[in-house]
């Protein structure tokens, strides 16, 4: 088979993990054509973000200390992972070059006194550049040919929206397929940096946090992969967060649309745009653990088997959100009111997670992340208060709970079971939405009630009995 394997940072954060990954890749390569996509090693992207913050505060010393911390982490891993001394020496020299370039970039950004989205993307690309060099060297070290390529080098071409770029798929498909087909012929395993591409001018761009999954599916669609595997520290998609629900079960199979909903509502292991390149090609995806390779994980397909069509599959939760209740008499029956509110928030790059409007149109309630709350309230007050808005009411520390499952469509009594169960457990619901697809039913409760609500619904729909073999 032609397989694309994406490894998350937690899968490659110790020498032992890297050696295990290299051995797994070597064994799979005997019967399959492989493309490997890697994230930055754990904590590296966080350190790079902190470097950017330090430069903004003109704290050059802190930025350079963090760069040295990143260098030490990778040098240590290289020394512990690579057995052949000549191979190890060459890798450490390459790392020295990358770190010198990183320090020079920090100097330049401090000198200019500004951190632009473009310079941030260049800065953030160092995490993947270091990790792919380490992984491809580890594969070479055990006798298998491998080469590391950045997203730019393999041919991922994007727009120039730095920080949240989108691929230009036609150009990307031509370049990536050409680059990788020649490596397949040479029996060389490419290890590609996730999360990063380059615009048409060759400037480094990124897909936003968690974008390595997206890189994997872009590449998978370019090479017409048979399957794409997302390898991380979890066994697959679960019926609930196992930290909240001790008897949460692994889901054997879900549809693309269900997986997209799960990604939107808190399944941290998937970037929400991951599925875009797969939808037309209908390439199956597996979400698997690199620490438990005997487990097949969760299969994500365009049309799951009938046995996988439970009415409710999963109870997801997203904590730490703010609820804004927007009221105003002049909103009633005035065309374009909602449009003005949402375009005002969109112009400020604020993502609205949920919306509810009462039939009288006198109020609209929206949910945003706690981190965006101040900014959202500020912009609404500045732009619209006293015009179409009379009053804003804010509630902080709210959680979104979502029930997801394509089998909910047309199933009678799901909502009554949900709210009956919450009432029994004395959980108060602040807001409810259900899309016309009936694929999910989402509502908002206080953060302090979130765990109780998730556990109660998991019990109510007997999700611990899913996939019992």
Image: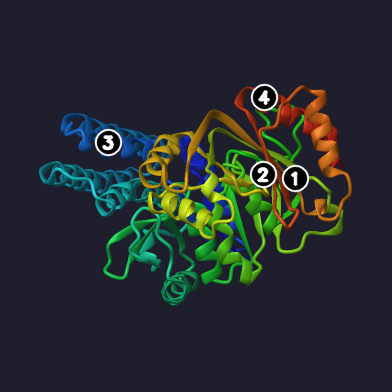
**Residue at mark 1:** 251
Q: Are marks 4 and 1 in contact (CB under 8 Å)?
A: no
Q: Is residue 143 visible?
A: no
Q: Left or right: 426 with respect to 98? A: right
Q: Toward the viewer: 358 or 101?
A: 358
Identify the mark nearer the N-term, 1 or 3. Answer: 3
Q: What residue lies at 12% left-to-right and 46% top-to-bottom? A: 112
* Residue drawn 88% across the image and 44% down it: 413
Reply above or below: 89 against 196.
above
Q: Are marks 1 and 3 in contact (CB under 8 Å)?
A: no
- Is 181 rendered above or below residue 335? below
Q: How many marks?
A: 4
Percent coordinates x, y for residue 142 in the rendering: 47, 49
The residues tagged by marks 4 and 3 sit, at their Cα atoms, a distance apart of: 34 Å
Q: Is residue 52 left or right of residue 463?
A: left
Helix or strand or loop: what does disc 2 sit on?
loop
What colour-coding does the image apply? Answer: rainbow
Give percent across and percent down for residue 201.
Answer: 26, 69
Q: Mark 4 highlights which residue?
A: 449
Q: Badge 3 is on which residue?
A: 53
The reply to whether discs 2 and 1 touch (Cβ–Cβ < 8 Å) is yes
Mark 2 highlights which residue? 236
């Amino acid at each position: 088979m032609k397989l694309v394997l994406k490894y998350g940072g937690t899968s490659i954060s110790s020498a032992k993990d890297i050696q295990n990954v290299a051995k797994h890749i070597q064994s799979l390569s005997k019967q399959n054509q492989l493309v490997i996509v890697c994230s930055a090693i754990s904590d590296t992207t966080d350190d790079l973000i902190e470097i950017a913050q330090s430069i903004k505060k003109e704290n050059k010393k802190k930025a350079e200390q963090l760069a040295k911390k990143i260098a030490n982490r990778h040098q240590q891993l290289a020394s512990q992972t690579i057995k052949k001394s000549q191979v190890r020496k060459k890798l450490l020299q390459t790392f020295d070059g990358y770190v010198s370039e990183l320090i020079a970039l920090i100097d330049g950004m401090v000198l200019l006194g500004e951190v632009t989205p473009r310079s941030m993307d260049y800065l953030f690309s160092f995490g993947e550049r270091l990790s792919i060099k380490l992984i491809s060297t580890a594969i070479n070290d055990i006798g298998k040919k491998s080469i590391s390529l950045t997203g730019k080098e393999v041919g991922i071409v994007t727009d120039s929206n730095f920080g949240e770029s989108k691929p230009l798929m036609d150009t990307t498909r031509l370049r990536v397929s050409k680059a990788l087909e020649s490596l397949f012929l040479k029996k060389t395993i490419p290890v590609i940096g996730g999360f990063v591409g380059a615009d048409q001018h060759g400037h480094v761009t990124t897909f936003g946090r968690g974008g390595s999954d997206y890189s994997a599916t872009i590449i998978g669609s370019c090479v017409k992969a048979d399957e794409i595997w997302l390898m991380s520290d979890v066994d697959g998609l679960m019926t609930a967060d196992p930290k909240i629900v001790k008897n949460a079960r692994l889901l054997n199979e879900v549809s693309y649309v269900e997986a997209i909903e799960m990604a939107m509502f808190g399944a941290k292991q998937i970037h929400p745009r991951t599925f875009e390149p797969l939808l037309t090609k209908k390439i199956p995806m597996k979400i698997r653990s690199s620490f438990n390779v005997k487990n097949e994980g969760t299969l994500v397909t365009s049309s799951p088997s009938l046995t996988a069509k439970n009415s409710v599959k999963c109870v997801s939760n997203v904590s730490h959100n703010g609820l804004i209740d927007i009221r105003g008499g002049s909103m009633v029956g005035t065309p374009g009111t909602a449009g003005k509110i949402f375009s005002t928030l969109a112009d400020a790059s604020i993502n609205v997670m949920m919306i509810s409007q009462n039939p009288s149109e006198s109020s609209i309630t929206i949910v945003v992340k706690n981190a965006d709350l101040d900014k959202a309230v500020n912009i609404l007050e500045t732009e619209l208060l006293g015009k179409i808005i009379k009053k804003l009411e804010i509630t902080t520390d709210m959680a979104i709970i979502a029930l997801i499952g394509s089998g909910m469509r047309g199933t009678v009594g799901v909502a009554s079971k949900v709210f009956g169960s919450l009432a029994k457990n004395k959980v108060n619901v602040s807001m409810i939405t259900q899309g016309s697809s009936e694929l999910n039913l989402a509502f908002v409760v206080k953060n302090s009630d979130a765990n109780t609500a998730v556990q109660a619904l998991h019990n109510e729909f007997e999700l611990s009995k899913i996939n019992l073999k």
